Image: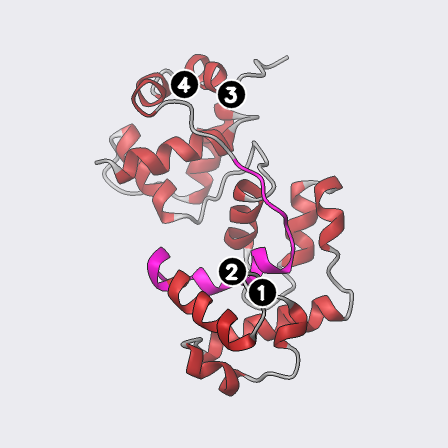
Amino acid sequence: MPETNPYQFLRQADPKFGPLIDRFGELLLTTDEVGFHSFASSIMGQQLSGKAAATISQRTRDGLGCGDRFTPESLAGHTAESLRPFGVSRQKAGYLLDLAERTLRNEIHFDRFSAMEDEAIIEELIKVKGIGRWTVHMVLMFDLARPDVLPTEDMGIQEGLRILDGLESRPKPKEMIARAEIWRPFRSYACLYLWKYKDNQ
């Protein structure tokens, strides 16, 4: 049986994490209500800085009149053009509207996610335009607090691992999967430290 404490487990499994845990303390996964808002926000944040995404998201919610959380009902009847004045690109508008339409058609059941396996959630959601594995991985980690997620497409994690291992270039996804095998079942926690380490270099 693996050690249930993720920090102790990582210290024992990979000695390179000991100094990171000492330096940054016990980084935590947090939970939040997972629903339409989580994924709409993730779509809004794609390829934007956190500040820019927050500004556009707030402007869009104000324009839609849906308060502090996106709802599928508030997007119903909108088009890519009608969302443009809020700063939403045509491509992202298409993604948001597809997510809203699928939700309203009951093709996505957010209330089931807490009881579903990670891969089952991924398979259900990547059918939505604009939602790829990275987007679902972020929600699995930061909303559902799943402990063993490895977003191999995330450049921050790639760079953190490159620095940690002293590599000349960022590792490829297959290399990351092989490297991270010793971190199971706490790969999410390892990723928290890789992000933090990269940001403090």
Q: CA distance from mark 4 to mark 2?
A: 34 Å
Q: Position of residue 50 (x, y in %)?
A: 36, 56
Q: Which residues are magenta?
A: 30-52
Work out which residue is located at the far right of the displayed protein and give it. Answer: 106
Of the residues tagged 1 and 4, which is closer to the observer? 1
Residue 160 appears in view: yes
The image quadrant that residue 65 belongs to is bottom right
Q: Which mark is residue 41?
A: 2
Q: Secondary structure at mark 3?
A: helix
Check disc 4 and give the amino acid type: Asp
Find the residue positioned furthest to the bottom: 81
Q: Is residue 161 visible?
A: no
Q: Nearer the viewer, residue 29 or 159?
A: 29
Circle 1 or circle 2, nearest the eye: 1
Report the residue marked by disc 4. Answer: 14
- The kind of residue tagged 3 is Pro
Q: Earlier in the sequence, mark 2 or mark 3?
A: 3
Say which element carries label 4.
loop
Query: Where does label 3 land, which residue?
Result: 6
Determine whether, in the image, residue 50 is placed left or right of residue 126: left
Single out the mark in the foreground, 4 or 2: 2
Q: Nearer the viewer, mark 3 or mark 4?
A: 3
Q: Residues within 10 Å of mark 2 (few under 14, many from 20)?
A: some
The residue tagged 1 is 70
Image quadrant where residue 163 sits:
top left
Would you say 49 lies left or right of 92 here?
Answer: left
Residue 114, image x and y in percent? 71, 42
Q: Are marks 3 and 1 in contact (CB under 8 Å)?
A: no
